Image (tube, rainbow, N blue to C red):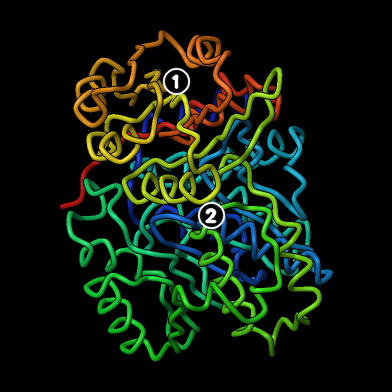
Amino acid sequence: MTYPEAIQFLYDLRLFGLKLGLENTFALTALAGNPHTQLRFIHVAGTNGKGSTCAMLESVYRAAGLKVGLFTSPHLVSFRERIQVNRQLISEADVVRLVVETQHLLERMPADHHATFFEVLTVMALRYFQEQHCDLVIWETGMGGRLDATNIVTPLASVITNIQFDHQKWLGHTRTQIAAEKAGIIKPGVPVLTATDAPEALEVIQRTARDHGAPLTLVSAADARGGLLGAVELPLLGEHQRLNAALAIATIRALAARLPVDDATLRRGLAQVQWPGRLQVVQGMAGQVILLDGAHNTAGAEALRDALARYFAGQPPALILGVLADKDWSEMCNVLAPLAARILLAPVKSERTAAPDALRDACAAANPQAGLTVSASLTDALHQAGGDPFVVVTGSLYLVGEALEALGVLFGNGAHERGLNEWTGHPRH
């Protein structure tokens, strides 16, 4: 098998869509020898900030000398981004080997149990981290928590970043419902940490933690402004990233007896964290500043708006916007369009893209003064914005991944592998 053939096999699993539930994952990991029972995890759920919080935890524990696995999604360019050890992407050869081995396991599954892409990916990652003898795995949920394939592990700590509106079709249409899904990662006696501040969501998390005898730590905006974090210059821009960092610090403190990290190491780890596509500044031609941010829901758009006011005040950008149709793109346009000098609407390279023409009316209503252009592609939009001194590309991590590749920041076979981020599934009942 070649690497492209392995990727094609993973593509073909999309036929089975997105299926929330743990039965297949438990069965497949059992056939694989239950590798998760030989690993230690920090399990991270939440609506926004999961990836950044995972990156911070990984960077600190790696700075402390641990061998750290990192499991995240979606990927920006390469599928291999999803499985990393000490921030080294899994090799193409290891992907091929694990796909072949997992195919053999799938042959032993009951005929009516069709594993999905994410279930297979989860088991591949567990096997790889076990083979690599990772000291710790930073383990991000795919969607929700309670029925997410990652929820077969019993972690050292459960982390819930926040509860916002996203994936409502699958997770519920109220914060209470969404919080119940995210709180599903809470395990008996395992410390829980959250930066959730929405009262109705926090009540669910508090009740679930109490029912499971799980000690709960609440992290607030005040924690993001002082203490050890006050002496750290985070490479990731945005006040929301400081709150993510405060949550990471609280998690590290909660696990200090089992995974000791001194303050100097903690500061060094945070100062070195890297996580592309989140308020990432790229220098374009002739001094042009391009800001890439994967804001993909209303809360993310609001965080981007606040960051623009803080770091780029008085610099209305050319806004290149592309959004997935299953997001609340109308409200995202309301938040982002008023910030722009002009707006270029581009399709996301996804079967779930919102048509740029559909965004036009929402953007025009939110900012009648801005010039509006509907671009045939992101490449065209970047070309059309070539003379603008400040450009913001946002609305989807998929769009940002395409931009990172087009701008030569990340390399890979993104045009093909980004399609692995696609999924369909059955709504929540």
Give whichever of 150, 259 is nearer the camera. 259
Q: Residues within 10 Å of mark 2 (few under 14, many from 20)?
A: many
Residue 349 - label: 1
Give the total of numbered labels.
2
Three-letter amino acid code of the residue under disc 1: Lys
Please name the residue shown 51% across and 39% down the image.
293
Q: Residues within 10 Å of mark 1 (few under 14, many from 20)?
A: some
Please name the residue shown 46% across and 88% down the image.
189
Whole-number angstrom distance, CA of label 1 to CA of label 2: 27 Å
Three-letter amino acid code of the residue under disc 2: Gly
Give whichever of 362, 39 is nearer the camera. 362
* SS at circle 1: loop
Residue that badge 2 annotates: 238
Q: Position of residue 92 (x, y in %)?
A: 74, 33
Taking the image as shown, residue 151 lies to the left or right of residue 365, namely right
Q: Position of residue 8 (x, y in %)?
A: 55, 23
Classify residue 180 by image quadrant. bottom left
Residue 316 - label: none
Note whether 207 is above or below 281 in the view shown.
below
Taking the image as shown, residue 401 lies to the left or right of residue 23, namely right
Going from N to C along the chain, the mark reached first, 1 or 2, is 2
Q: Position of residue 413 (x, y in %)?
A: 65, 21
Classify residue 401 by image quadrant. top right
Q: Position of residue 389 (x, y in %)?
A: 58, 23
Please name the residue shown 58% across and 13% down the image.
386
* Identity of the residue furthest to the right in this view: 65
Q: Quadrant of the N terminus?
A: top right
* SS at circle 2: loop
